[in-house]
Amino acid sequence: MIRVTVWNENIHEKEMENVAKIYPKGIHGTIAEALRQCPDLEVREATLDMPYQGLSDEVLANTDVLIWWGHCGHHLVDDALVERIRSRVWGGMGFIALHSAHMSKPFRTLMGTPCTLRWRDGDFERLWVVDPQHPIARGLGEYIELEEEEMYGEPFGISNPDDVVFMGWFSGGEVFRSGCTFRRGAGKIFYFQPGHETCPIYHHPQIQQILRNAVHWAAPADGVGSEPTCPCAIPSPEAVRKHKDA
Ligand code: ZN
Protein backbone atom coordinates (compact mmCIF):
# COMPACT_ATOMS: atom_id res chain seq x y z
CA MET A 1 0.00 0.00 0.00
CA ILE A 2 1.11 3.57 -0.69
CA ARG A 3 0.28 5.82 2.27
CA VAL A 4 -0.81 9.25 1.02
CA THR A 5 -1.56 12.30 3.15
CA VAL A 6 -3.59 15.05 1.47
CA TRP A 7 -2.67 18.18 3.45
CA ASN A 8 -4.62 21.39 2.87
CA GLU A 9 -4.60 24.76 4.60
CA ASN A 10 -8.44 24.67 4.36
CA ILE A 11 -8.90 28.42 4.85
CA HIS A 12 -10.67 29.63 1.68
CA GLU A 13 -13.24 26.83 2.03
CA LYS A 14 -14.18 28.12 5.48
CA GLU A 15 -14.12 31.84 4.65
CA MET A 16 -15.43 32.12 1.09
CA GLU A 17 -18.92 30.93 0.21
CA ASN A 18 -18.10 30.46 -3.48
CA VAL A 19 -15.18 28.18 -2.62
CA ALA A 20 -17.21 26.20 -0.06
CA LYS A 21 -19.84 25.63 -2.75
CA ILE A 22 -17.28 24.10 -5.12
CA TYR A 23 -15.53 22.13 -2.37
CA PRO A 24 -18.06 21.33 0.39
CA LYS A 25 -15.68 18.68 1.75
CA GLY A 26 -12.66 20.95 1.25
CA ILE A 27 -10.12 20.75 -1.55
CA HIS A 28 -8.47 17.95 0.44
CA GLY A 29 -11.75 16.01 0.59
CA THR A 30 -12.25 16.13 -3.18
CA ILE A 31 -8.64 15.11 -3.89
CA ALA A 32 -8.77 12.33 -1.29
CA GLU A 33 -11.96 10.95 -2.87
CA ALA A 34 -10.29 10.90 -6.28
CA LEU A 35 -7.28 9.04 -4.89
CA ARG A 36 -9.44 6.49 -3.05
CA GLN A 37 -10.51 5.14 -6.45
CA CYS A 38 -7.14 3.33 -6.39
CA PRO A 39 -7.24 0.28 -4.11
CA ASP A 40 -3.46 0.45 -3.55
CA LEU A 41 -3.65 3.91 -1.98
CA GLU A 42 -4.27 4.42 1.74
CA VAL A 43 -5.44 8.04 1.89
CA ARG A 44 -5.42 10.30 4.94
CA GLU A 45 -6.70 13.91 5.08
CA ALA A 46 -4.97 16.60 7.12
CA THR A 47 -5.60 20.33 7.55
CA LEU A 48 -3.68 23.21 9.06
CA ASP A 49 -6.26 23.76 11.83
CA MET A 50 -5.72 20.26 13.25
CA PRO A 51 -3.33 19.58 16.17
CA TYR A 52 0.31 19.74 15.02
CA GLN A 53 -1.00 21.57 11.94
CA GLY A 54 -2.24 18.20 10.70
CA LEU A 55 1.21 16.62 10.46
CA SER A 56 2.24 15.11 13.77
CA ASP A 57 5.44 13.03 13.93
CA GLU A 58 3.23 9.95 13.77
CA VAL A 59 1.35 11.13 10.65
CA LEU A 60 4.52 12.18 8.84
CA ALA A 61 6.28 8.93 9.78
CA ASN A 62 3.40 7.06 8.13
CA THR A 63 3.32 9.11 4.93
CA ASP A 64 4.94 7.88 1.71
CA VAL A 65 3.59 10.71 -0.44
CA LEU A 66 2.54 14.14 0.86
CA ILE A 67 0.25 16.39 -1.20
CA TRP A 68 0.09 20.08 -0.17
CA TRP A 69 -2.38 22.79 -1.18
CA GLY A 70 -1.68 26.13 0.46
CA HIS A 71 -2.20 29.80 -0.39
CA CYS A 72 -3.06 32.48 2.19
CA GLY A 73 -1.74 30.44 5.12
CA HIS A 74 1.87 29.96 3.99
CA HIS A 75 3.20 32.16 6.83
CA LEU A 76 1.29 30.11 9.42
CA VAL A 77 3.20 26.89 8.73
CA ASP A 78 5.72 26.22 11.52
CA ASP A 79 9.35 26.43 10.44
CA ALA A 80 10.10 23.30 12.50
CA LEU A 81 7.44 21.41 10.54
CA VAL A 82 8.92 22.63 7.25
CA GLU A 83 12.27 21.24 8.40
CA ARG A 84 10.70 17.86 9.21
CA ILE A 85 9.06 17.74 5.76
CA ARG A 86 12.36 18.62 4.06
CA SER A 87 14.16 15.91 6.01
CA ARG A 88 11.55 13.28 5.16
CA VAL A 89 11.65 14.18 1.45
CA TRP A 90 15.44 13.78 1.50
CA GLY A 91 14.80 10.37 3.05
CA GLY A 92 12.54 9.38 0.16
CA MET A 93 9.01 10.72 0.77
CA GLY A 94 7.26 11.91 -2.38
CA PHE A 95 6.02 15.52 -2.31
CA ILE A 96 3.34 16.97 -4.59
CA ALA A 97 2.94 20.76 -4.44
CA LEU A 98 -0.32 22.01 -5.92
CA HIS A 99 -1.10 25.38 -7.51
CA SER A 100 -0.31 28.25 -5.06
CA ALA A 101 1.93 25.90 -3.06
CA HIS A 102 4.64 27.21 -5.39
CA MET A 103 5.16 29.94 -2.75
CA SER A 104 4.83 27.61 0.24
CA LYS A 105 7.67 27.24 2.74
CA PRO A 106 8.19 23.49 2.10
CA PHE A 107 8.35 23.87 -1.70
CA ARG A 108 10.63 26.93 -1.66
CA THR A 109 12.88 25.24 0.91
CA LEU A 110 13.17 22.13 -1.25
CA MET A 111 13.79 24.16 -4.42
CA GLY A 112 16.21 26.63 -2.85
CA THR A 113 14.94 29.25 -5.33
CA PRO A 114 12.33 32.08 -5.21
CA CYS A 115 9.60 30.06 -7.06
CA THR A 116 8.02 33.32 -8.22
CA LEU A 117 5.79 33.73 -11.27
CA ARG A 118 3.30 36.15 -12.80
CA TRP A 119 -0.45 35.64 -12.32
CA ARG A 120 -3.90 36.93 -13.33
CA ASP A 121 -7.38 35.66 -12.55
CA GLY A 122 -9.84 34.27 -15.04
CA ASP A 123 -8.11 32.92 -18.16
CA PHE A 124 -8.88 29.88 -20.29
CA GLU A 125 -6.06 27.32 -20.08
CA ARG A 126 -5.01 24.64 -22.52
CA LEU A 127 -2.80 22.23 -20.60
CA TRP A 128 -0.53 20.51 -23.11
CA VAL A 129 0.90 17.06 -22.42
CA VAL A 130 4.47 17.70 -23.59
CA ASP A 131 5.93 14.40 -22.32
CA PRO A 132 3.31 11.77 -23.24
CA GLN A 133 5.63 8.88 -22.30
CA HIS A 134 5.99 10.12 -18.72
CA PRO A 135 4.22 7.98 -16.06
CA ILE A 136 2.38 11.08 -14.78
CA ALA A 137 0.82 11.54 -18.25
CA ARG A 138 -0.57 7.98 -18.45
CA GLY A 139 -4.09 7.76 -19.89
CA LEU A 140 -4.33 11.36 -21.09
CA GLY A 141 -4.88 12.81 -24.54
CA GLU A 142 -2.88 15.57 -26.23
CA TYR A 143 -4.17 18.32 -23.97
CA ILE A 144 -6.78 19.22 -21.35
CA GLU A 145 -8.96 22.32 -21.69
CA LEU A 146 -9.81 24.21 -18.51
CA GLU A 147 -12.57 26.76 -19.18
CA GLU A 148 -11.43 28.98 -16.33
CA GLU A 149 -8.19 28.92 -14.37
CA GLU A 150 -5.86 31.44 -12.81
CA MET A 151 -3.09 32.31 -15.25
CA TYR A 152 0.39 31.44 -14.00
CA GLY A 153 3.07 32.74 -16.37
CA GLU A 154 6.79 32.45 -16.94
CA PRO A 155 9.38 33.17 -15.80
CA PHE A 156 8.83 30.56 -13.06
CA GLY A 157 11.61 30.88 -10.50
CA ILE A 158 12.37 27.19 -10.02
CA SER A 159 15.58 25.23 -10.46
CA ASN A 160 15.73 23.44 -13.82
CA PRO A 161 13.23 20.54 -13.60
CA ASP A 162 14.18 16.94 -14.39
CA ASP A 163 11.06 16.64 -16.56
CA VAL A 164 8.46 19.07 -17.82
CA VAL A 165 5.36 16.90 -18.24
CA PHE A 166 2.76 19.62 -18.82
CA MET A 167 2.94 23.06 -20.38
CA GLY A 168 0.08 25.50 -19.85
CA TRP A 169 -1.06 27.98 -22.53
CA PHE A 170 -3.38 30.76 -21.42
CA SER A 171 -5.86 32.84 -23.40
CA GLY A 172 -4.01 36.00 -22.40
CA GLY A 173 -0.95 34.77 -24.29
CA GLU A 174 1.30 33.50 -21.50
CA VAL A 175 2.82 30.02 -21.20
CA PHE A 176 3.91 28.15 -18.06
CA ARG A 177 5.77 24.98 -17.07
CA SER A 178 2.63 23.61 -15.39
CA GLY A 179 3.82 20.14 -14.44
CA CYS A 180 7.46 19.69 -13.40
CA THR A 181 9.40 16.95 -11.62
CA PHE A 182 12.45 17.23 -9.38
CA ARG A 183 14.52 15.01 -7.10
CA ARG A 184 15.81 16.14 -3.74
CA GLY A 185 17.83 13.53 -1.85
CA ALA A 186 15.94 10.25 -2.26
CA GLY A 187 12.59 12.03 -2.66
CA LYS A 188 10.63 12.74 -5.82
CA ILE A 189 8.79 16.05 -6.17
CA PHE A 190 6.02 17.04 -8.58
CA TYR A 191 4.75 20.60 -8.95
CA PHE A 192 1.33 20.95 -10.65
CA GLN A 193 -0.13 24.36 -11.54
CA PRO A 194 -3.94 23.93 -12.07
CA GLY A 195 -6.12 24.23 -8.96
CA HIS A 196 -7.22 27.80 -8.21
CA GLU A 197 -9.72 27.68 -5.36
CA THR A 198 -12.60 29.42 -7.17
CA CYS A 199 -12.46 27.02 -10.16
CA PRO A 200 -13.71 23.40 -9.90
CA ILE A 201 -10.36 22.03 -11.18
CA TYR A 202 -10.01 19.06 -8.82
CA HIS A 203 -13.43 17.71 -9.89
CA HIS A 204 -12.12 17.34 -13.47
CA PRO A 205 -11.71 13.60 -14.28
CA GLN A 206 -8.43 14.05 -16.15
CA ILE A 207 -6.95 16.29 -13.45
CA GLN A 208 -7.86 13.55 -10.97
CA GLN A 209 -6.12 11.04 -13.23
CA ILE A 210 -2.97 13.19 -13.18
CA LEU A 211 -3.03 13.29 -9.36
CA ARG A 212 -3.40 9.49 -9.15
CA ASN A 213 -0.55 9.06 -11.64
CA ALA A 214 1.63 11.54 -9.74
CA VAL A 215 1.14 9.75 -6.42
CA HIS A 216 2.19 6.42 -7.96
CA TRP A 217 5.20 8.06 -9.63
CA ALA A 218 6.31 9.89 -6.46
CA ALA A 219 5.97 6.90 -4.12
CA PRO A 220 9.35 5.64 -2.87
CA ALA A 221 10.25 2.21 -4.27
CA ASP A 222 11.76 0.97 -0.99
CA GLY A 223 9.98 3.03 1.63
CA VAL A 224 11.23 6.18 3.30
CA GLY A 225 14.58 6.05 5.11
CA SER A 226 16.38 8.64 7.16
CA GLU A 227 18.27 11.53 5.64
CA PRO A 228 21.36 10.57 3.65
CA THR A 229 24.62 10.75 5.64
CA CYS A 230 28.35 10.71 4.78
CA PRO A 231 29.62 7.36 6.11
CA CYS A 232 33.35 6.63 6.28
CA ALA A 233 34.14 3.99 3.61
CA ILE A 234 36.62 1.95 5.66
CA PRO A 235 37.04 -0.89 5.02
CA SER A 236 36.83 -0.46 1.24
CA PRO A 237 34.91 -3.09 -0.75
CA GLU A 238 38.20 -4.30 -2.21
CA ALA A 239 39.70 -4.71 1.26
CA VAL A 240 36.62 -6.78 2.20
CA ARG A 241 37.00 -8.95 -0.94
CA LYS A 242 40.70 -9.57 -0.39
CA HIS A 243 40.10 -10.41 3.26
CA LYS A 244 37.49 -12.97 2.15
CA ASP A 245 39.94 -14.52 -0.35
CA ALA A 246 42.76 -14.70 2.20
ZN1 ZN B 1 -4.88 30.59 -7.19
Image (spheres, helix red, strand yellow):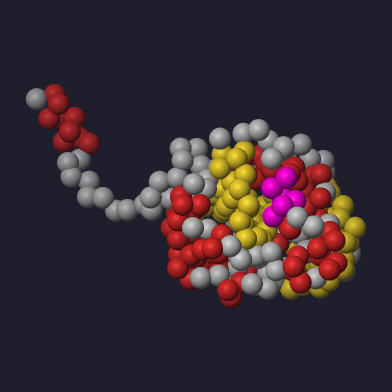
Q: Which residues are magenta?
A: 28-33
Q: How far across and down, in percent of the image, does residue 9 sit?
A: 65, 65
Q: Main secondary structure of the magenta part?
A: helix
The quarter of the rendered structure image containing the C terminus is top left
Looking at the image, the residue that sits furthest to the front is 51
The quarter of the rendered structure image containing the N terminus is top right
Looking at the image, the residue that sits furthest to the bottom is 75
* For residue 19, above or below residue 236: below
Q: Which corner quadrant of the image does residue 138 belong to?
A: top right
Q: How far across and down, in percent of the image, does residue 198 sit?
A: 82, 65
Q: Nearer the viewer, residue 91 or 139?
A: 91
Q: Nearer the viewer, residue 144 or 237?
A: 144
Q: Nearer the viewer, residue 234 or 43?
A: 43
Residue name at image x 22 percent, y 36 percent: 237
Asked whether residue 29 appears in the rendered view, the answer is yes
* For residue 197, above or below residue 88: below
Q: How far across and down, in percent of the image, does residue 88 sit?
A: 45, 54
Give the left or right position of residue 96, taking residue 63 as reference.
right
Q: How far across and down, in percent of the image, does residue 174 sit?
A: 81, 67
Looking at the image, the residue that sits furthest to the top is 245
Asked whether residue 162 appears in the rendered view, the answer is no
Residue name at image x 67 percent, y 52 percent: 164
Residue name at image x 45 percent, y 61 percent: 84
Q: Is residue 29 magenta?
A: yes
Residue name at image x 18 percent, y 45 percent: 234
Q: How many marks?
A: 0
Q: Which corner quadrant of the image does residue 75 belong to?
A: bottom right
Q: Is residue 130 magenta?
A: no
Q: Nearer the viewer, residue 106 or 11?
A: 11
